[in-house]
């Protein structure tokens, strides 16, 4: 079902697909239209909504850009018509029931109209279940979003308090206490929920707690507002003082303690471990488990309520089950039984032993117990059948071990904890326990560490919680260590926990040890599951797709997916989302990964570990090479041939590489981790090959240079340690290409020159790459004579049989130089040669670049129709490749044709799109180029005031980039502005300065402008 979601982060979903809405501005545009659903919002109002009081001069045009971005994103899930153009602006054309906030309001109104009924409670629960975050419109800070979020938050509070009131009316006081405690703590000035909490506490016999809640509320109201509680809250207080059950309703406060059954004087067994005094959070999970066990003895039920709480080691499964057991103790007058089915041993407790323990707990003489499982099961069912008992079965290993322990009828309830999901257990309800949110984890840390400890730097507490992965056991141990060492500042523990190789050693306090808990969970796995976990943990990958298990384990991809999913079922691996290729992404919890890595180092030989890593690297390299060839950036020209590749199989490859750029985006962090691992473990050649793959990745993703730089730095250290001169040369060339992409042309030239020195005469192809890189850097710097010499030398090195794509790139550069120096025929000859080679190599990206360059030749010679035809051909290619940069640069060039052929409006719209892309991608060269063209457009229209700002900004950017020719071209345009504004001498000096630059670099403008040196 298609849906716009506002109750949390703003999102658009259609079934299981989420539209990737991109940055905050498109999100704000969509949110503003949906908040004002059905209302035509003018462009001016949208500007006010999106930018508040800080709108740029181009905000009106940017609104159109952002609307287009929203429509493109929505088109991916088949709903592009949601945002319609309606003069003077736009409207969201959407049924109200497709917006979660509108459905929430409708359900709230319906629930309040149904009276004090079960149906009303269900409707309100459905309404509250629509909320996905703490606040509505999360992530948007604009005024309209804050106002709407505040309105919806108030309605949510109303719904919650109506729900609490219904629960009390329906005699569910037990279930309301935990959520009311959290609600009152979050909203201490709201008197209605405080009165509800007092009522619930009174009904469950906790009169003193109810009075304390009132005293706390009175203090808060006096301190914060200087007032006393209102009449309603005071009336509740008086009723508690006088134990007026008539005013406070029925409940369990006055219920007598049940008499022993069958005349027994023996006390009911209570084997639950003590509740945790500092138990915090888990309100939703407590409510789930409490409601489940409250179903015991319901009319019509013939089987016991069974709840399975599953989760990883240290997540707090047992603590939750025990806490719920104590909260619901009055439901089970015949006892609360607890059996640890694993205890501290690595071998599960046999069913016969567990049955014997349960029978002894119920008073059966140990000497009369049979020995066989069937007889024990029959005796157990006989004794448990007539008892109202809670049974907590802790650390269950599997369904088969549990079935004999389940009671036969509805009189008992069962809570089971397990590291596995136990999905085959008939009739069970399941709760997957995840790590708590940051606020709950911080609350636990502070409670355990002690109220007296100073948290003057809250970021240190947050980092401790993060380093513990918010795992409750780890957080508890960290808090215990701080409590035991009051002289430690929290920052000291942070420093000790940051080293992941010693983190498990640090997470130990008294008899609490995280490693022991993790070891217990690890021992639950079968040998193949352990091997899969060890191998997946080996590289410290931040996340991964299931296919990587295939090369790591040397198995097929279907087997690999099954192996990963089994570890998901055991809660060792989490599913963290779906990547852009449509594949699920998985992650091992940090602490579990470190433990599994330790086991890998102990249980597997160095040779086996290295072989597994090399197989994975070979598969990555094969996929990366193929993705680069299909991707938008033409990155194969910068991707040296790897030493070894390992295909995954055609069907898997097709699925993985259907979207090359998305695949690179998903795998980039993993590739970087693999480079680091290989560099640190003596696999230098693999490290440099993977670094080459990251060049392709960064080129495909545009301007994501951090991974490129870090990978090359790590690989460089490895090849230098191993004396690999050739590898060092290739990595230097990679760094030269990186600096080129960053517009740092002098640094780029220096890296390529160092690479050339190392390549020498031994590696002519490498030398050709370095020479081409040096020539390209000089070309961008307008040092045309030097550039031409270097590029022609590179072409000679490649020879007639060299790599076609590489030769095409050099010819492209030669044609570029000839064009910039006004040698049209030579430029066309070189570019035509490049075009033929690119087409022969099926390199669409190179073809598009060359068509654009040929069009520039036509444009320079005034053949505008021919130029426009070639620009449009190039634009079709780049659009098909999803090459945003190619589209932007081609549109900028086409806008100049439109400007020169009398179509300024079309040119202006095109340039505003280009400017948004350049700034989003942080492409300073592209931004300067577009700004200069905008200035030319406004100058041609006679608007010198509007032309001045973009031209001056462009000139500043050219100066920052160290590109004197481009700055001179822009200064020439500025001279036109200054001349029109009467600044004659300034204009004359600027043109003289520009002409000197044109002459010094041999640019075509030297002859074109020679007769136009005066204003």
Image: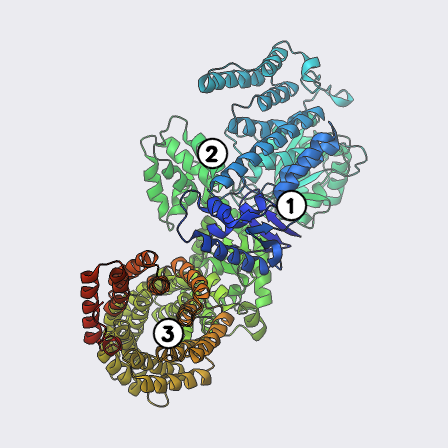
Residue 70 position within the rendered picture, expressed as x and y whole percent measured from the top left: 53, 56
Q: Is residue 554 left or right of residue 710?
A: right
Residue 857 position within the rendered picture, expressed as x and y whole percent measured from the top left: 36, 80
Residue 444 circle label = 2
Q: Residue at x 65, y 28 (%)?
A: 162
- Helix, strand or loop at label 1? It is loop
Residue with the mark numbered 1: 350
Residue 762 is at least partly visible in this image: no
Image depth: mark 2 or mark 3 in front: 3
Q: Are marks 2 and 3 in contact (CB under 8 Å)?
A: no
Q: Residues within 10 Å of mark 3 (few under 14, many from 20)?
A: some
Residue 997 position within the rendered picture, expressed as x and y whole percent measured from the top left: 20, 71
Label 2 – label 1 distance at C-alpha: 35 Å
Residue 701 circle label = none
Sequence order check: which comes first, mark 3 or mark 1? 1
- Taking the view exactly as shown, the residue that stands out farthest to the right is 300
Instruction: Say if 457 sits above or below 57 in the image.
Output: above
Residue 300 is at least partly visible in this image: yes
Compare residues 228 and 47 and report the one nearer the observer.
Answer: 47
Q: Residue at x 34, y 30 (%)?
A: 486
Compare residues 909 and 616 and report the one nearer the observer.
Answer: 909
Residue with the mark numbered 3: 638
């Amino acid at each position: 079902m298609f849906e716009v979601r506002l109750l949390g982060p703003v999102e658009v979903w259609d079934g299981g697909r989420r539209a990737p809405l991109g940055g905050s501005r498109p999100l704000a545009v969509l949110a503003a239209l949906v908040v004002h659903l059905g209302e035509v919002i003018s462009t001016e109002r949208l500007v006010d909504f999106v930018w508040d009081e800080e709108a740029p001069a181009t905000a009106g045009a940017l609104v159109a850009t952002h609307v287009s971005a929203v429509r493109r994103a929505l088109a991916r899930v088949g709903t592009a018509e949601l945002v319609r153009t309606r003069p003077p602006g736009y409207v969201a054309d959407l049924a109200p029931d497709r917006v979660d906030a509108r459905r929430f309001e409708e359900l709230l109104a319906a629930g309040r109209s149904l009276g004090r009924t079960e149906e009303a409670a269900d409707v309100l629960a459905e309404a509250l279940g629509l909320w996905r975050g703490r606040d509505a419109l999360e992530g948007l800070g604009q005024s309209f979003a804050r106002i709407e979020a505040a309105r919806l938050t108030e309605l949510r509070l109303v719904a919650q308090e109506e729900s609490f009131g219904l629960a009390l009316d329906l005699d569910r006081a037990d279930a309301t206490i935990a959520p009311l405690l959290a609600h009152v703590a979050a909203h201490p000035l709201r008197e209605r929920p405080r009165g509800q909490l007092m009522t619930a506490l009174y009904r469950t016999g906790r009169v003193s707690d109810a009075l304390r809640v009132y005293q706390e509320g009175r203090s808060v109201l006096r301190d914060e507002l200087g007032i006393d509680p209102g009449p309603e809250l005071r009336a509740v207080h008086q009723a508690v003082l006088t134990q007026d059950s008539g005013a406070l309703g029925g409940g369990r406060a006055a219920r007598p303690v049940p008499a022993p059954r069958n005349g027994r004087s023996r006390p009911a067994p209570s084997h639950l471990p003590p509740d945790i005094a500092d138990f915090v959070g888990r309100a939703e999970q407590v409510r789930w488990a409490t409601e489940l066990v409250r179903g015991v003895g319901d009319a019509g039920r013939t089987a016991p309520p069974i709840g399975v709480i599953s989760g990883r080691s240290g997540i707090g499964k047992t603590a939750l089950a025990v806490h719920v057991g104590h909260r619901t103790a009055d439901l089970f007058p015949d006892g609360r039984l607890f059996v640890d089915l694993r205890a501290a041993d690595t071998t599960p407790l046999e069913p016969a032993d567990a049955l014997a323990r349960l029978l002894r707990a119920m008073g059966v003489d140990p000497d009369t117990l049979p020995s066989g499982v069937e007889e024990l099961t029959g005796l157990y069912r006989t004794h448990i059948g007539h008892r109202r008992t809670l049974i907590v079965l802790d650390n269950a290993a599997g369904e088969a071990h549990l079935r004999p322990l389940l009671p036969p009828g509805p009189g008992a309830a069962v809570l089971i904890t397990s590291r596995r999901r136990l999905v085959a257990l008939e009739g069970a309800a399941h709760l997957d326990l995840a790590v708590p949110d940051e606020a709950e984890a911080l609350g636990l840390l502070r409670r355990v560490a002690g109220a007296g400890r100073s948290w003057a730097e809250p970021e240190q507490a947050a980092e401790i919680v993060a380093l513990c992965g918010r795992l409750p056991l780890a957080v508890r141990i960290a808090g215990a260590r701080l409590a035991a060492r009051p002289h430690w500042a929290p920052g000291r523990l942070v420093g000790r926990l940051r080293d992941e190789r010693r983190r498990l050693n640090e997470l130990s306090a008294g008899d609490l040890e995280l490693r022991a808990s993790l070891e217990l969970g690890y021992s639950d796995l079968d040998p193949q599951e352990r091997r899969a976990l060890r191998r997946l943990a080996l590289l410290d990958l931040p996340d991964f797709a299931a296919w990587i298990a295939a090369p790591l384990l040397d198995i097929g991809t279907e087997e690999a997916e099954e192996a990963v999913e089994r570890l998901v079922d055991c809660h060792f691996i989490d599913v963290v989302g779906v990547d852009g290729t449509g594949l699920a992404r998985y992650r091992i919890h940090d602490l579990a990964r470190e433990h599994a890595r330790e086991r890998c180092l102990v249980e597997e030989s160095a040779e086996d570990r290295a072989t597994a890593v090399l197989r994975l690297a070979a598969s990555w390299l094969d996929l990366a090479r193929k993705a680069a060839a299909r991707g938008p950036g033409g990155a194969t020209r910068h991707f040296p041939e790897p030493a070894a590749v390992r295909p995954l199989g055609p069907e898997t490859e097709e699925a993985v590489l259907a979207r090359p750029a998305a695949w690179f985006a998903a795998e980039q962090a993993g590739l970087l981790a693999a480079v680091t691992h290989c560099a640190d473990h003596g696999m230098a050649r693999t490290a440099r090959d993977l670094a080459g793959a990251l060049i392709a990745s960064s080129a495909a993703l545009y301007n994501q240079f951090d991974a490129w730089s870090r990978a090359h730095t790590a690989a460089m250290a490895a090849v230098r340690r191993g004396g690999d001169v050739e590898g060092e040369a290739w990595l230097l060339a990679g760094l030269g290409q990186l600096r080129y992409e960053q517009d740092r042309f002098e640094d780029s030239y220096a890296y390529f020159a160092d690479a050339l020195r190392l390549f020498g005469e031994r590696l002519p192809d490498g030398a050709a790459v370095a020479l081409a890189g040096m020539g390209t850097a000089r070309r961008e710097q307008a040092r045309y004579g030097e550039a031409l010499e270097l590029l022609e030398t590179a072409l000679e090195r490649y020879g007639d049989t060299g790599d076609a794509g590489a030769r095409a790139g050099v010819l492209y550069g030669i044609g570029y130089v000839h064009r910039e120096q006004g040698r049209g025929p030579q430029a066309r000859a070189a570019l035509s040669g490049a075009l033929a080679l690119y087409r022969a190599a099926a390199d669409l990206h190179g073809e598009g670049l060359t068509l654009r360059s040929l069009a520039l030749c036509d444009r320079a010679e005034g053949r505008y129709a021919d130029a426009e035809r070639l620009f449009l051909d190039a634009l079709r290619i780049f659009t098909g490749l999803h090459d945003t940069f190619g589209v932007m640069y081609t549109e900028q060039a086409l806008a100049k044709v439109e400007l020169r052929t009398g179509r300024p409006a079309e040119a202006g719209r095109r340039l505003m799109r280009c400017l948004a892309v350049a700034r989003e991608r942080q492409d300073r060269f592209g931004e300067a180029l577009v700004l200069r063209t905008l200035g030319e457009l406004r100058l041609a229209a006679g608007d010198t005031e509007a032309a001045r700002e973009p031209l001056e900004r462009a000139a500043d950017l050219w100066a920052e980039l160290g590109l004197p020719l481009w700055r001179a071209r822009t200064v020439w345009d500025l001279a036109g502005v200054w001349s029109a504004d009467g600044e004659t001498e300034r204009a004359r000096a600027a043109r003289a300065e520009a002409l000197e630059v044109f002459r010094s670099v041999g640019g075509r403008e030297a002859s074109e402008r020679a007769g136009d040196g005066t204003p």
